[in-house]
Amino acid sequence: MASPLKKVICYKLWVISLIIFLFLTHNSALITQYYSFAQSSRYVRVAIFQDVSSLRLKIKGSYEIIDSVSNKVLNRGKNLNTTVTVYTDGILLGNTRAKTNKLFIKPYYPESVIINGRIFRGDIQLIKNNMKLSVVNHIDLEDYVKGISVRETSHYWPIDSLEAEVIVFRTFALYKMQENSKKDFDLTSDVYSQVYSGRAAERYRINKAVDETKDLVLTYQGKIFPAFYHATCAGYTEDAALLWNIDIPPLKGVSCNFCQDSPHFKWHNVLSQEEVKDALVKGGLRIENIKDILIIGRDKSDRITDLKIVNDKKDMKISAKDFRNILGPNIIKSTNFQVRVIDHDIVFEGFGWGHGVGLCQWGAYFMAKQGYTYKQILEYYYPGAQVSLITNR
Ligand SMILES: [Zn+2]
């Protein structure tokens, strides 16, 4: 017969085993879909500086410098603090010449590299092109998501909205890794990809959301898709097929009654006729003295498809998407607007912020406040998509 002490120990072991089992199966218990990632590396390649003449490079601790063309280790050292420039045959680290167009700087874990005062996890690749330098940060996918998120969301938001968002950021990055695998980098670090600022951008609650959704991505019919997102849709998310050559059910658009209290629900901007004309001329339109701007059509989400610029020359037609890009996406915050020409001014009054495709971030914020889970939020904004766990085969 087992003694009472043995019984207590057995019971404790059983409880500990159960806790470990539940912890290990936390994601897979919820997630039944798997996404097999064929690429050997889970490292994202982010261009953090492009076409610069010189850089300040600092590493506190041990590091290795490798010629990434020949794969030869050129130098091993400790505590680097130098200027990086280029010369005809290669890259200059201070006065040391490296006869190659591509160098890898690998700090020994857990050291980080500081470039022009900004701190980055992972490895750094220096690329010389036309006597200019570009810097590509090779970083683990999970660390990358931590380094972008504070620039793309707010770390004090409800945890389920943060979890939904980081799954979207991770999916978008993975899509770009597949799309650009033959190029020198997968993403840039600016608004044209996802704003990434390295270690300084990390915040406790976002890191927690990343850790708790580790390796979770969105798939449609077993494939990664470009999980677009935007700040506020103001009523209806946009059909990606109307903007780009992407026509899949998760990106067809849904109605959204969640973002009405977003600070970006309504916007208003006044520009002078001269400012609008100058921007459009710079953007390639042959116009002079704008008399009126007419809305030619709207799509089912109420966003404008095309505009007509009535001016002293021939009337010009322009897509609302191009019009917004030319004037600036933070000036014309969405393509859902009214426009009036009043004397010398052009008044824009609109709804929402962003292209409107995919996740409405402020909608996700209010959904999470109402108790929706990250999975429900994602299923709502990307109908037909599934949350899948990345596996390496
Ligand atoms: Zn919305």
Image (cartoon, grey):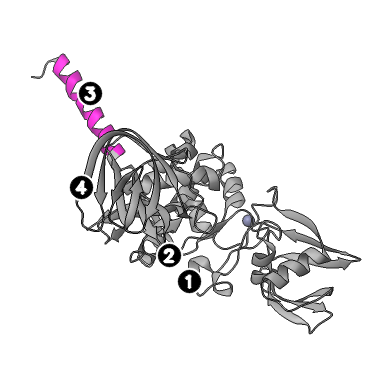
Give the position of the C terminus as an image quadrant: bottom left
The residue beneath circle 1 is: 248
Query: Upstream in the sequence, badge 4 or badge 2?
Result: 4
Please give the name of the residue rendered at 48% of the width and 71% of the height, measured from the top-left corner: 248
Task: Inspect the image, locate mark 1, and give the three-letter code of the amino acid beneath it.
Answer: Ile
Mark 2 vs 3, N-terminal side = 3
In front: label 2 or label 1: 2
Q: Nearer the viewer, residue 2 or 262?
A: 262
Q: Secondary structure at mark 2?
A: loop
Q: Relative to the observer, which residue lies in front, 276 or 128?
A: 128
- Mark number, residue 12: 3
Identify the amino acid type marked 2.
Phe
Mark 3 surroundings: few (<14), some (14-19) or many (≥20) residues within 10 A: few
Give the spatial CA distance, label 3 vs label 4: 52 Å
Q: Is residue 165 left or right of residue 236?
A: left
Location of mark 4 (residue)? 73
Choose between 323 and 111: the one closer to the eye.
111
**Which residue is denoted by mark 2 in the rendering?**
225
Q: For ligand 1, which image quadrant applies?
A: bottom right
Give the mark, 3 or 4, whose residue is nearer the N terminus. 3
Q: Are marks 2 and 1 in contact (CB under 8 Å)?
A: yes
Badge 4 or badge 1: first in the primary sequence: 4
N-terminal of the pair, mark 2 or mark 1, is 2
Front: mark 4 or 1: 4
Residue 199 placement: quadrant: top left
Mark-to-mark CA distance, 2 and 1:
9 Å
